Amino acid sequence: MNRPAPRLPPWISHALSAQRGPVPWSAVVRGALAAGPLLLAGVLAGRTSLGVVAALGAMLAGVNDRPGSRRASVGRLGLPALAGAAGLLAGSYAGRHTGAVTLTLLLTLLGLLGGAVSAVGPVASAVGTQLLVTSALGAGMMLPEPGWESALLYLAGAGWLLGLRLLLPTPSSAARGARLGYRFDGERAAVAGVYEAVAALLDAAGTPGATARRAALTAALDQAQDALAGPRLRRHAGSAAERRLHAQYAAALPLAEAATALAWAERPVPARAGEGPRRLAVAVRAGAPTGPLPAPARTVPALRALDDALLRAAEAFDSGEGGRLHTRRRGARALLRIVLGAGGREYGFRVAASFGASAALAQALHRTGWYGPHPHWYWLPATAVFLVKPDLGPLVSRVLSRAAGTVLGALVFAGVAAVVPRPGGLIAVVALCGALIPVAARHFAALTAVITALVLALLMVGGEPGASWNRIGETLLACALVLIAGHLPVPGERAGGVRARLTVAADAAYTYLVHVLDEPGERARRWTLRRDAYRTLAEAQAAIGRAAAELPALARHTEGTAEVAATLERLVDTTTACAVHLDDTGSLDVRHRERLEQLFTELAARRRRAGLGTADGGRTPEGLSGAISRAGRKETGVTQIR
C-alpha cells in the first residue's frame, strides 16, 4: 500500500511557490530603459548623486509596473512616486536637522501612518511602502544636494518610467497594426478577457471546476473595471473608441450574471453556449463586428437570460454608445474608516514597531561603529518596510525569501563587481537588473535578489565601496526584528485586517441580496452591487489565504474564516441565480428558497465557530433571513421566503 507523500506546512510551501505566466516583454524593455540610462545621464553630467536618486525613483516605480491599461498605470505608478518624493523630502530634512531620538520618533510616526494607509488597498500599500522606504533613504544617505532637489529628481525618475509606460507600444498593439493603435490596448485586452472568462465558466458548468472558473471571472471583471476606470481629464469617456469599450464592458455584465446562474444550477449546458462569448472576445480584440452569434437553447431561465444578454451585447457592439462601469467609488469618509479601523490600526502598529525599532538599531550601530565603518544606516529600516508588508505573502515566507534573496543578490553582485569595469560595467548591471524586475516579481526571493544587486550597483557608482557583506548582516537583523514584531500582541482583536475585510464582504453580500428582492427589476444598481459583493469577497479570500499560510501561532487567529468566506461566496452566487430567476418568472421557486435558508443556517454556525459574533450593524445571518422575509411580504412580485 502506497502511503501519500507528506505535505509541507503552508508557510514552507508558500515560500517555494512562484507565479507563472508569459514574460512581460514590454515591461522588460521599459525596465532596461529606465534606471540604467538615468544613471548614465547623471554620470555623464557630473552629477552622479542626482543620477543615483533618479535611478532609485525609476527602480521603485518599476516594482509597481504591472500589466494593465495605460490609464490605470497613472495611479498605480504615479501616486506611490508622489509619496516617495514626499518621504525623501521629509527624511532629508529630518536627517539633517534632528537628533537620533527625535528622528527615530518621527520615523516611527511615519511608520504608523504608512501602515494604516496601506490597509486601503494595493495602490495605497505601494504609497505607504515608498513613503517609508524613501524617508529612511533620505535620512540615512545624507545626499549632498538639498532635499527638495533630490525629491524632484526622484519624481523625475519615476516620471520617466511612467512616460515610457504611456508612450511605448506593446507587442500586442504592434501585432494588431496601426488601424487600432496602442492607446487602448490594455483596456481592450481586459474587456476581451471578461468574455473569455464567461465562456470558460459556461464550459465548466456542472463540473467541479466551476467554482474556480467563477473566481477567474470575478478577477477578469475586476481587472477590466480597473483598466477602464483610471484617471481622465473628462468625467466621461472622451472618444468613440473609449465609449465603445465601455459599451462592450457593460454588455458583458448580464452575460456574466447568466453564466453564474447556470454554474450555480450545477448542470452542464449545451456546448454551443460558450461560442457566443468567445466570438465577442475575438471582436473586442480585433475591433471588428461581432458577426452572427449562435443562439443558445432557451429551456431554463438562465439560458433565456444568456440568450437575451447575447442579443443586447450584439446591439451594444454595433451602436458603441457607451455604458456605465458600475463601480462604487469610496469617498473620503469610507477611506478614513478603513485607515482608522481594525485592519488599519493593526497594520499601522506592526509597521511602526518594525520601522521604528529598525531605525533605532541602525542608528545605534551607525553611531557606535559596533561592527566597523557604517556610514549609511538606511538599509535596515528600508528592509523592514518590505518585510512587514502582508500583501507580499505570509510573514515567515517573506522573511525566508528576503534573507535568501539578499544573500544571493549580494554574492552575485560581489562576483560581478570584481570583474566589470567602473562605472560603465556597473551601469550595465543597473540596466540589466531593471530589465529583470518584471520577471523576478513572480517570487519575492528573486525580486529581492535583483533589487539587491541593482541597489548595490547604484551605491558603488555613488562612491560607497564594499557594502555587500554589511547588507547581508543588516538584512538578517531586519528579519529578526520583523519576526518579533509580527508576533507581538496588538491592541484590540488579533487578525483585525482579515476580520475587517470579511465584515465588509458580508455587508456587501447583504446589500446585494436585499436589493435583488426589493427591486428585482432595477438592473443597473444590481450589477453595481454584484460587482462590489464579488470584489470585496475576493479581497477577503486573498487575505484569508495569506493568513492561513502563517506559522500556527498566527494562523490560529483566523481559523474558520475561510469557511465563512466560502459560505458567503455561495450566498452571493445564489443571490445572482435568484436575480436571474426573478427576471424571468417574477418569483422564487422552492430550490432557491431552500438554498437561501440552508446558507443562512450554515453561515450562522460557521460565524460562531470562527468567533466572529455578529456583523456590523447587527447584520447577522438571522437578520439577513428576516430582511428577506420582510422583502417577500412586500408587493414586489417576489414570493415570500418564509
Image: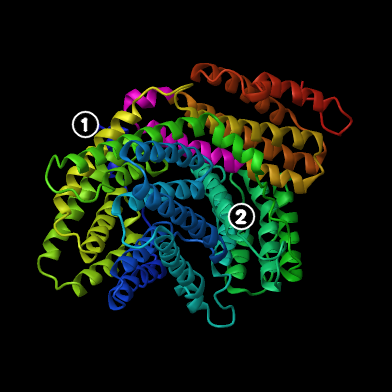
Residue at mark 2:
225
| Start-end of magenta stretch | 534-557
Q: Amino acid at mark 2?
A: Gln
Is residue 543 shown in magenta?
yes
Give the image quarter of residue 112: top left
Residue at mark 1:
2
Does residue 369 lie above or below 589 as drawn? below
Quarter that holds the C terminus: top right
Give the left or right position of residue 212, taking residue 367 as reference: right
Give the left or right position of residue 6, taking residue 342 as reference: left
Q: Position of residue 636 (x, y in %)?
A: 86, 33
Kind of element beneath mark 1: loop
- Disc 2 or 1, which lies upstream in sequence? 1
Q: Residue at x 35, y 63 (%)?
A: 145
Q: Position of residue 473 (x, y in %)?
A: 17, 43
Q: Nearer the viewer, residue 582 or 550?
A: 550
For the stretch drawn in magenta, the main secondary structure is helix
Give the image quarter of residue 501: top right
Is residue 528 shown in magenta?
no
Q: Nearer the viewer, residue 415 or 239?
A: 415
Q: Residues within 10 Å of mark 1 (few under 14, many from 20)?
A: few
Q: Residues within 10 Å of mark 2 (few under 14, many from 20)?
A: many
Q: Residue at x 27, y 39 (%)?
A: 399
Specify whether residue 136 is in view: no
